[in-house]
Amino acid sequence: MNSPDNGGPVDRFDAACDRVLEPMRSLAAVRAVFGAASTAGDFSIVWHVIGLLLAIGSLDRLREALFLSVALGAESLIVNQGIKRMFRRERPTEGGDDRFDVRRPSTSSFPSGHASSATLAAMLLVSFTGWPAGWVFVVVAVVVALSRVMVRIHHASDVLGGALVGAGLGWVALAAASAVL
């Protein structure tokens, strides 16, 4: 990763994204939606809740919800205790933008765990429910991932990296799901 002051291509990309998003951070609706999305993504809460809601009245859906939760737990360990420790990238701000009330993360910035878990969860939920319902999960995943840049807890490149990691782990999870569900 580039350091914040060397002006490499990753830093320029992150700075350009931040400039585009900055005017939106002052809008009350943006602060409400992305602040809530960032909080809902903490500890993958939104994904566990969605899985449980889908499981109401169905043992098959309950098995899928339990699989989703186990997969999210494995993803969290891999990202937060593995990959983030290799990169140790500094966050754009220590506690986020003051305009947003978000939890201060204890891990490093790259990759975004919210983006990784959102991508993995959306992939599994789409496979469990199919389309067109799957679009809801894709939209929620994009909002949760983008929220991390909006609240200035992550750089845009952290979110892209997290989405790529989540996609890779998602493919592994899909293969495991087809074998055990």
Image: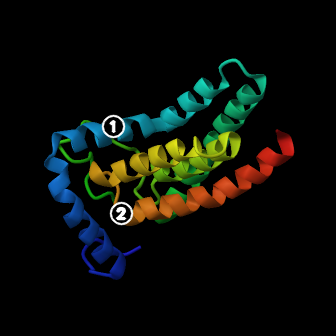
**Amino acid type indicated by mark 2:** Ala
Percent x, y for residue 10?
36, 75
- Above or below, comparing residue 117 to residue 103 in the picture: below
Q: Secondary structure at mark 1?
A: loop
Dot 1 and dot 2 residues touching (CB under 8 Å): no
Frontmost residue, 111 versus 168: 168
Of callouts 1 and 2, the N-terminal one: 1
Q: In screen coordinates, is 27 left or right of 146? A: left
Q: Which residue is mark 1?
A: 103
Quarter of the image where the C terminus is located: top right
Please say if 3 is above or below 113.
below
- Image height check: is 3 above or below 80? below
- On the image, the x and y values in percent for residue 63 come to 75, 30
The three-letter code of the residue at mark 1 reads Arg
Coordinates of residue 12 in the picture (x, y in percent) = 28, 77
Number of residues whose C-alpha sits closer than 10 Å to that of mark 2, classed few (under 14), some (14–19) or many (20 or more): many
The residue drawn where x is 44% and y is 51% is 142
Of the pair 128 and 81, the residue shown nearer to us: 128
In percent of width and height, residue 27 lies at 16, 45
Query: Tag 2's secondary structure?
Result: helix
Residue 74: which numbered mark, if any?
Answer: none
Q: What colour scheme does the image use?
A: rainbow
Query: What crowding class fits label 1: few (fewer than 14 Cα within 10 Å), some (14-19), or many (20 or more)?
Result: few
Residue that numbered label 2 is attached to: 156
Question: What is the spatial separation of the Cα atoms under label 1 and label 2, in whole angstroms?
Answer: 19 Å
